[in-house]
Structure formats: C-alpha cells, structure tokens
Amino acid sequence: LGSSGATPRAGEARFYDNGTVPFVKIGDLNDGIIHGTEMMVTEAAAKESRLQLKSEGTVLLAMYRSIVKTGVLGIKATTNQAILAFEPDVARLDPNYLHYALLRFQRDFVSLGRGATQKNINKQIVEDFCIPLPSLLEQREIVNSLRVLDRVLESLREACRCGEHSRDALATALLSGA
C-alpha cells in the first residue's frame, strides 16, 4: 500500500532555512533513480508536519499535475502530498520491478485520471489497479532484461545526438563557405 507525504507551511522560514532533510516534489521525479532533491526541509518541518522519512528503494508516483511521473529513491527522503510512496515487501516485490510496471502502465493511469482542467489520480485508483506479480526470480529477470534494453536505448540516443552535432557542424562549414 502506498502513502502520500505532506508539505510544511509555506513561508515558515524555520521549516526551510538551512534544511538538511531531502524533500521530494513532483519536479524531482525523473522516471529513474533520485539522487538528490531541489528542496530541503528542516528537522522541525519534518516533525511538525509529520513527514515520514522514506528509505532508499522506495518507489514514487506523482498523483497530480504531471501524473504518473515516477522515481526510485536513491537516498532517504520525505515527499509532498502530491506523491504516492511505495515501500514494497522486498521478499515478494522487487522495487525495480514495481517501478518498471508503473512506467509500463503510465497511459492507463492517465486514462483513469479525474478532473476537468487538470487530470489527477488518487491512492485508491492506484491501489485498485492490478499489476501482474510473477515470482521474485521472474521479476528480477524482467528488470535485468529491461535494464539491458535501457542501456542500448541510451547508447542509440547518444549516437543520434552525436550524429546531429556532426550534421550541424558540417552544414555550418558548407553553408558559410569554409
């Protein structure tokens, strides 16, 4: 089951100035591993706002605005109320498998979003959604296969960027008479 975070009162300097507790907002979600956050809050903010410090490996899902942006904590951090956090029982569910499953079903979650001007999902929609749950061994095999594919895709993206840069450089040289 997931849990959402909270946001300390805005404008309360003692909650934000010189903060040391990572505070994840939707903008920090990168569909990958989260190694840092844009914002930090103070210990007072964490305590008084009842922020729960989530452990590394916690899987995050945005419910508002940029619904279904995801991330996996690579650090201990707290989250705001727009993010649903899952701390799976690793004896039954590999966190990386859950992350890939959430990525796979992004369009489904978007289609289930509610709201006229801004589509949002809620905890109940996510918890009612069925995600296939193969054995832990099979989950890990799936994750390993998808990671290999991710590396291949990143290599191809990099090759395309290099090719575009070379094309641009050649076009500049040819068109400037150099």
Image: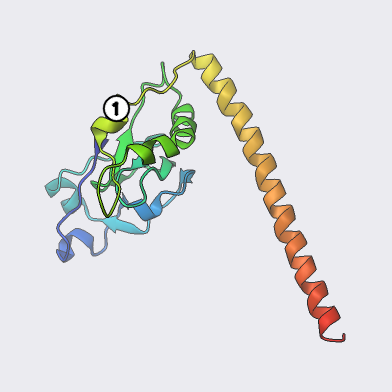
- What residue is drawn where x is 18% and y is 59%? 15
- What residue is drawn where x is 77% and y is 60%? 163
| Total numbered labels placed on residues in the image | 1
Task: In the displayed orientation, state which residue is furthest to the bottom.
Answer: 177
The quadrant of the picture occupied by the C terminus is bottom right
Instruction: Locate residue 25, reporting x and y percent.
Output: 32, 52
Q: Is residue 57 above or below residue 117?
A: above
Quadrant in the picture for residue 128 = top left
113 left or right of 145? Answer: left
Instruction: Locate residue 2, reporting x and y percent.
Output: 28, 31
Instruction: Locate residue 68, reporting x and y percent.
Output: 39, 42
Can I make out residue 35 in this image? yes
Q: How is the image coloured?
A: rainbow
- What residue is drawn where x is 27% and y is 55%? 117
Viewer-closest of 101 and 117 = 117
Q: Is residue 143 above or below residue 35?
A: above
Task: In the displayed orientation, state which residue is furthest to the left.
Answer: 48
The quadrant of the picture occupied by the N terminus is top left
Can I make out residue 60 in this image? no
168 left or right of 74? Answer: right
Quadrant in the picture for residue 176 = bottom right
The residue pinned by badge 1 equals: 127
Task: In the displayed orientation, state which residue is furthest to the front.
Answer: 116
Circle 1: is it few (<14), some (14-19), or many (20+) Cα within 10 Å? few
Instruction: Locate residue 134, reporting x and y percent.
Output: 48, 15
Please, what secondary structure does the residue beneath circle 1 have? helix
Viewer-closest of 136 and 126 = 126
14 left or right of 139? Answer: left
Viewer-closest of 49 and 1 = 1
Q: Is residue 165 above or below residue 34?
A: below
Dot 1 amino acid type:
Glu
